[in-house]
Image (tube, coloured by chain):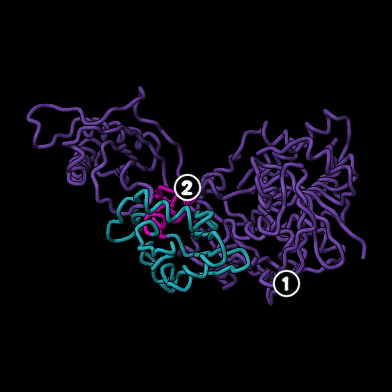
Amino acid sequence: MSSLRYLALNGSLGTGFKETSLQRALDGPLDFIAADSGSTDGGPFYLGTGEWIWAREAYERDLRLGLLAARQAGVPLIIGSCGGGGGDAAVDGYVDLVRDIVRGAGIAVRVATIHCEPDREWLAGKYRAGDLRELRGAPTIDEQTFRAPGHIVAMAGAEPIQEAIDAGADVVLAGRTSDAALFAAIPLSRGFDAGAVWNAAKIIECGSAAAENRSGQDCLACTFDDEGFVLEPLDPALRCTPRSVAAHTLYETADPYKLVQPSGTLDARDATYTALDERRTRVVGGTFTPAAEYTAKLEGAAPVGFLSSFWGSTRDPMILAQLDTWIESLTAHTRQRLASAFGENAYDLRITVYGANATTGEPMEAVPREAVLSFDVLAPTQEAASAMARAAYHVALHWPIKEWSGSITTFAHPYSRPVIDRGPVYRFTLNHALVLDETERRSVFLVNLQDVR
Amino acid sequence: MTPALTPAVTTPLPAATSEGLEHIRRNFRLIRSKDAGPFMLTLDLFFADAEVHEAFRSSGVLAAAVIAQLYGVAADEVDSYDMAEIAAMKLSFPRKVVSGDFGDTDITGGQQYAVLIEYLAALEYGSDGRPT
């Protein structure tokens, strides 16, 4: 069997990598370049709105360097989960980015787009037909879940990417896609062992995160041989050691060994890690078991309202000593005030004490010397949230304690104006696997080709 | 729109003392938390070496039931993995507040390990530096 070498630009397109690392990767043979562009780390906002996580300039820089390197090597560039949430509009937005890049460079490329937002009524039908499987921690859903505003994406596996590559794509721009599938598609097509392929893909999808002494995002190369694969950072200062590679398999995954894909499940429990030299680690092992039914994970984000917030710091020991009861009475009074000024509006009010128990919610035994009080008002419109937050601000700023007999000011705030309108708030609505037959799979993950010049 | 509070222990843990933190420094290379998708939280503990790993594992101080109590979830919801080859342990369980829901104060789950640090810092340690 021939060998194969590929490159991960970084763990998240738009977060940068060293140009020297990319150039060094081009010194050796190369079969493709890929990068994941998605994340749910920042919460449901990005999927819900379709807004891109990083700035257009940040994506453009990484995409341009990656694309020009791929063209120089004459190999495909594969980008998944465009924009962060992986919605259809971001895929189209990345086509525009690619157009700007190839025009600037005076070249032409064949671009394959893979859209990942299934038709909502069709999804509701699949739900009725019992073709959705609850994943762990899945929220309760009903048919209306599929009719809510916001976005629902299905996570593509390796198959649509293979289709795009087979059709001759120079650049693949995919909506929501399994991070690992970006790196597994071509090696699977070339006939490498599925266990090793998925194990490598799972490790490399975070770029240089699998390397020791990493100081920022950077490229990582993977070279396949007959039995296993070798991981090598392109920055000479970085090292992939058996320990750093094995340790990386734990990162932000509930199960360190298993990786569920649409077509089956990787179990990496049998993997072994051997140092090839100081900077390269060879991995052998990984077992892939094909699934009985093909499934695509669904992700959804729907709006819950608009948020307005303000915060200030309290330093008065007399207030801090009775903070719980002060907040309790303040909350009750604020609700009365909001009802009298705005009627029986639907809203949610939340007061969080930073410097005490805000981060973990665990009870505190000591009174803090200073605390930040954060006030959030969630309402159906931005105007309503803002109006109520401004009213709540005035109540809170002067809410008394019994020890002080005159009018008081209870917290310090640094900003004028103190109330900030934070825009729409979304929530994740789905954590389900969608069962697909081959025809459905091809229609959900529609591959389209276009020449961009 | 009535979110539950972020999960936590039911009784206050004392703030970590410098002595407690010294035990942590000696026994651990890294303790961290992170979301594993929006619906799960995962804790990673990298021990100083295989011996330390075994001491903590066999002592039961990091048993699933203990983690469940610390984080306010049911014991059978906690998945525990021992990775002897790299002297590490992983503990995963569903988040009580889904990432980004109104009322969530740690969207990435990145600071939830603090509870574990305070718990570990408050443990009794023997003269060999291992938990007793």
Q: Quadrant of residue A66?
A: top right
Q: Nearer the viewer, residue A210 or A101?
A: A210
Q: Which residues are magenta?
A: B96-119
The residue indicated by pointer 1 is A288
Q: Are marks 2 and 1 in contact (CB under 8 Å)?
A: no
Say left or right for A230 vs B91: right
Query: Is A56 situated above or below B97?
Result: above
Upstream in sequence: badge 2 or badge 1: 1
Q: Which chain shows up in cyan?
A: B
> Visible in this render: residue A359?
yes
Picture residue at 72% right of the left edge, 40% below the top: A94
Figure colour of chain A: purple
Picture residue at 88% right of the left edge, 30% below the top: A106
Disc 1: which chain? A
Say left or right for A97 vs A323: right
> Visible in this render: residue A142?
no
The residue indicated by pointer 2 is A426
Mark 2 and mark 1, same subunit?
A: yes
Picture residue at 73% right of the left edge, 41% below the top: A237
In which quadrant of the rendered image does the C terminus of chain A lie?
A: top right
Residue A69 pos. (x, y %): 84, 39
Secondary structure, magenta segment, majority class? loop
Per the image, is B4 magenta? no
Amino acid type, label 2: Tyr
Q: Secondary structure at mark 1?
A: strand
Picture residue at 73% right of the left edge, 47% below the top: A35
In which quadrant of the rendered image does the N terminus of chain A lie?
A: bottom right
Q: Nearer the viewer, residue A337 or B63?
A: B63
